[in-house]
Amino acid sequence: MAENGDLVQVRNLKKHFPITGGFFGRQVGAVKAVDGISFDIKQGETMGMVGESGCGKSTAGRAILLLHEPTSGQVLFKGDDLTQLSDKELRQRRPLMQMIFQDPYASLNPRHTVGKIVGEPLVINGKMKKGSQELKDRVAELLELVGMDPIYMRRYPHEFSGGQRQRIAIARAILSDPAVLLLDEATSSLDSESEAEVQRALEELMADRTVIVIAHRLSTIRNANRIAVLDQGRLVEIGNHDELIKLDGVYARLFATQFPEDREVSVQ
């Protein structure tokens, strides 16, 4: 870890998507989804990341975890620049950096049972033997932790609702014991009852971890230690909720739109 206590350090991170055209499909431009953002995240800190739709916050999250290869810039994790690691070295660090998506179905192998999906990290890392009773017991324990009956480990992802699939993804993330957890609108597509259940499971997972929360609904990140505000791929504001309200900038306008009756918008 860096000497100043920062677990993650993002330096001038950019992710540009090429625009092609013409008969030969040459690049004629680029969409600057993320355009030179920099910030640090300390051990145990919760960092919110917000902005209007299309501002680049989800792309930024994926670039930080290198799910999107950055166009340029650095992402340092415990002092190591992830962008300079080999594929093998990066795979060794993957369990320490987990992401829970808005639609978990995309991250769940439809050909695998829930038991295999949740328990696979232990098998891959050689901690437990495939098919062992020890592995089955651990998977059952995790499913119960997120509010699911262990009998579900024999079923497949398509047999579950969105809320149940999200809880399966959370159980798998708990098993990896990540140092950094990134939540990308993790409850925004759920109904109110499912959202409450998933949120309880997430709170269990988030305890004492370093967390990045990408959100459109500001209520999700209002209590974060700090909030990064993106606009057209750039970082335009950073601070906690009260500090950003006092700036009376992008965040304050977003908050006033979502909570027009909230008096805190006019904090002196």
Image: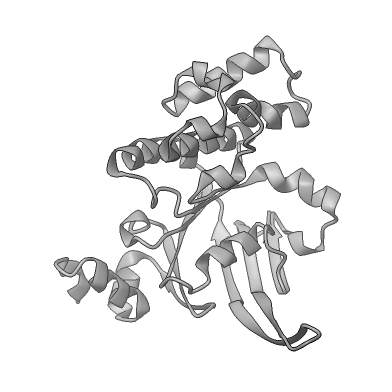
Q: Quadrant of residue 113?
A: top right
Whether residue 267 appears in this view of the structure is no
| Observer-nearest of 14 and 149 | 149
Q: x, y (%) of residue 162?
A: 44, 40
| Observer-nearest of 130 and 110 | 110
Position of residue 141 relative to residue 255, above or below, is: above
| Observer-nearest of 265 and 200 | 200
Q: x, y (%) of residue 181?
A: 55, 48
Q: Quadrant of residue 172?
A: top right
Q: Residue at x 61, y 80 (%)?
A: 32
Q: Residue furthest front?
A: 23
Q: x, y (%) of residue 231?
A: 46, 78
Q: Residue furthest top?
A: 133
- Say whether residue 35 is left or right of residue 162: right
- Say whether residue 138 is left or right of residue 266: right
Q: x, y (%) of residue 201?
A: 42, 35
Q: Residue at x 58, y 47 (%)?
A: 106
- Callout count: 0
Position of residue 143 relative to residue 85, above or below, is: above
Q: Residue at x 61, y 29 (%)?
A: 118
- Say whether residue 73 is left or right of residue 53: right
- If the image is split into quadrants, where does the C terminus sit? bottom left
Whether residue 259 appears in this view of the structure is yes
Position of residue 39 relative to residue 137, above or below, is: below
Q: Residue at x 50, y 80 (%)?
A: 232
